[in-house]
Image: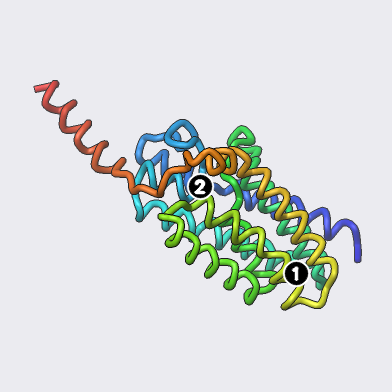
Amino acid sequence: MPLIKLILIAIAAYFMGNINPAIIIGKLYGIDIRKEGSGNAGMTNTIRVIGLGAGIAVFAVDVLKAFTAVTLGNFIAGDALGGIIAFACVVLGHCYPALYGFKGGKGVAASLGAALALNWQSALIALAIAGIVFLVSGRRMSIASIIAVITYPALVCFFVDDKRLFIFAIVAVLFLVIQHAANIKRIAHGEEESLTIGHAGHDKEEHEIEKEGTKE
């Protein structure tokens, strides 16, 4: 496989990862999402700060961009290695975007999109596990994400007969667990909060009304 193809896949996937809907939507509300709530530019913090609709939009775009990057990687390379490289680079681009000062999200939604492109069965089961844990744990998204991520390598091993994917899945898990180090610390101390829904749009409207009233 030509090295130039793998390099092009890596570059394209990284910059696709730089497309951060949480930051973009935050700007529409006059908010830097990285300076509000947990400071994470991802779905959970968007829901907490702005609202459920915005959070769902962030989730959908993050999943789609990663799915597209890995699908293109597989197609261009004609081999799973292209998808693996795209997976790694699109998640790195999401977590450490050059276009936004290398401060992005934690990579869970992007990893889901990438995993769906590599093997949809294992990805969907991991998503189902996350949903169940989310409900059982009292809507603690970080706990749901961490447990789902930890189960991913075993699911890949079950569904995919390619040792490269299994080894990569383990590396991906280690990366995502490190990304959630602060959450794990809070969980250990019983300080992790449940997911709440913000109302930034409503708050912004009230603020604008107050400003108009002041002008009058």
Numbered mark located on residue 107 in the image: none
Residue in the image at 35% along x and 55% along y: 53
Residue in the image at 75% along x and 65% along y: 83
Location of residue 187 with respect to 164 vertically, above or below: above
The quadrant holding residue 104 is top right
Q: Left or right of 44: which side holds 63?
A: right
Residue in the image at 44% along x and 61% along y: 136
Q: Determine contact: label 1, label 2, CB under 8 Å.
A: no
Query: Whole-Å distance between the Cαs marked 1 and 2?
Result: 26 Å
The amino acid pointed to by label 2 is Gly
In the rendered view of the protein, which quadrant contains the C terminus? top left
Q: Left or right of 109: which side holds 76?
A: right
Q: Residues within 10 Å of mark 2 (few under 14, many from 20)?
A: many
Which x, y percent locates residue 153?
72, 65
Location of residue 48 with respect to 166 vertically, above or below: above
Q: Secondary structure at mark 1?
A: helix
Q: Which residue is mark 2?
A: 42
The residue at the far left in this view is 216
Location of residue 101 with respect to 116 vertically, above or below: above
Question: What is the number of callouts on the image?
Answer: 2
In the rendered view of the protein, which quadrant contains the N terminus? bottom right
Looking at this view, is 89 or 142 the one in front?
A: 142
Mark 1 vs mark 2: in front: 2
Q: Which residue is mark 1?
A: 74
Which x, y percent locates residue 71?
68, 68
Q: Left or right of 83: which side holds 163?
A: right
Q: Considering only order in the chain, which callout, 2 or 1, is on the residue closer to the N terminus?
A: 2
The amino acid pointed to by label 1 is Asn
Which x, y percent locates residue 170?
76, 58
